[in-house]
Structure formats: structure tokens, C-alpha cells
Amino acid sequence: MAIEVEAADGVGEVVINNPPVNALDSAGWFELCDRVTELGKRSDIHCLVIRAEGKGFQAGVDIKELALDGTKIVDVNRGCYDSFAAIYDCPIPVISAVHGYCIGGGIGISGASDIVICSEDATFALPEIDRGALGAATHLMRLFGMQKTRWMLYTGEAIDAQEALRLGGVENVVPREKLRDTAMELARNIAGKSPKALRLAKWSLNGIELLDVKKSYRFEQGFTLELYTSPDSKEARDAFVEKRDAKFDGKNSD
């Protein structure tokens, strides 16, 4: 299974474990959504931690699935939307514990969470513009603000853990070996509060947020689909899979 679940002491853990890079295909995104939703409904769970095994936190969607079948973009879009919405709407606080790379869909996961903790080796990026796609700028903006989001989306370049901390997108930066313990300690602290108060606090915080996260992301996805059907998108995806530089003829800007 790409998604593993554990629960103890009022804390649920959702662990992404899908080597080699923790990218998820459409089925994997729906599975993530289901696991988060199930834990959020449990009366004995009061805080949720999302973390990952392997080299990095999460590398977005499975580009190879889309390369084999372009129609899968519809399922991938829906799976991502449902997963990020499940995290954002989870009735209990959600902590993302990020290590290594946090790319594309990883930004959606962490950006939909209530709190983000990362390890010293963490990097955050939205390289979609180099993959023939768009998306998750909504969640990136929740983490790092408007101007940094625009820079990251246009360039596809990453920022490191200390820059993420400076921008206020992460709560704490810790050594890699202490990441899970730090996240679990915080989660147990939160889980020890009144269950009623936690659920009302989450509901109220979502209600007063200025950005309508789900509508904003759904708006983005329309442009992702439009781009995906263009020759430029196919060239970008082919170049990525073939490990070469993409070549654009400049005829598809309208």
C-alpha cells in the first residue's frame, strides 16, 4: 500500500510510503483522501500527523501514469482535489512533517495542513511549469505568501528549510532524525486538549480564513487542464520522461 495508517494516544499517523520518490498515481491520491477522512471521523483521534518514508516527503503526481494515458488527468485532478480538501476539512488539526523534497502535490498536502514542521534537509518547490502543468499555487500561497508563490511558480525553483522558516510557512526546523518525534510530541500536546474545543477551533479557523482554499484550487485546475491539452504541455512531459530539455516553438501562447 502507498498509504499506511497508525493510531495511538489520540494521534493518527498517515504515512506516505511509495518508493522511489513517493509520487502518487490517481488511485494513490484517492487512497490518501480516504485514510485522512477515516481518521478524522474517529472519536478517539484528536490530531493527525502526515509524514513519509524514504528520500523525501512527496513528489507530486505520477507523471508516468499520465504519459501512458493522458485521460488520467481527470482522475488525477479529482484525486488531488479530494485529498487536499480532506486535509483542509479534516475536523481535527493536521500536522505535516516534511523531509527531503516537497514537490507539487507535496505542497498541496502541506499547504492544506494546519501546521508544518520540516527537517533541515527539506526543500519546497512547484516545478509544474517544467512538467506541462499548473496547480497547488493556492496551497503554496498559504505557506509562503503571494510574491514568493509567484516567483516559485514562474521559475520552478525550490526554497530550502531555513527560507521556509523565515517566510513563516513552517513552524520549526529540526534535524532529520528528530522530525517524527517532534511532530508526534506536538500532536500529543494538541490531542490532550478538549476534543470539543479542537473541533470547534478547526471549524472556526477555516471559517474565518480570507482565502477560499477549495474554490481557489478548483479555479487553478481549470487552467491545468487547458494547458495539459496543448502541444507545449506534451512537449514538456515528453522532455521530462526522456530526460532532455524541452523545445517550445512559441506558437501556442494565445
Image (cartoon, grey):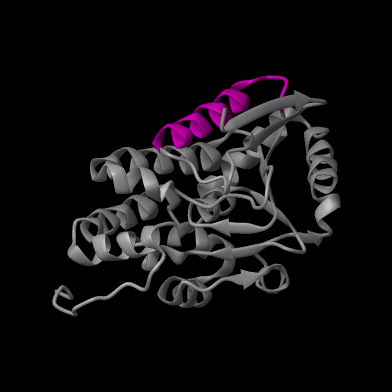
In percent of width and height, residue 191 lies at 78, 34
In percent of width and height, residue 146 lies at 49, 72
In percent of width and height, residue 182 lies at 84, 48
Q: Quadrant of the C terminus?
A: bottom left
Residue positioned 54% across, 70% down in the render: 145
Which residue reaches farthest top? Answer: 43
Residue positioned 64% across, 65% down in the render: 123
Image: 175 above or below 91: below
Of residues 151 and 238, which is closer to you in this image?
A: 238
Image: 178 above or below 43: below
Say left or right for 68 vs 195: left
Residue positioned 42% across, 53% down in the render: 212
Of residues 35 and 123, which is closer to you in this image?
A: 123
Give the residues drawn in magenta, as a range: 26-45
Q: Is residue 40 magenta?
A: yes
Say left or right for 182 vs 42: right
Image: 66 above or below 34: below
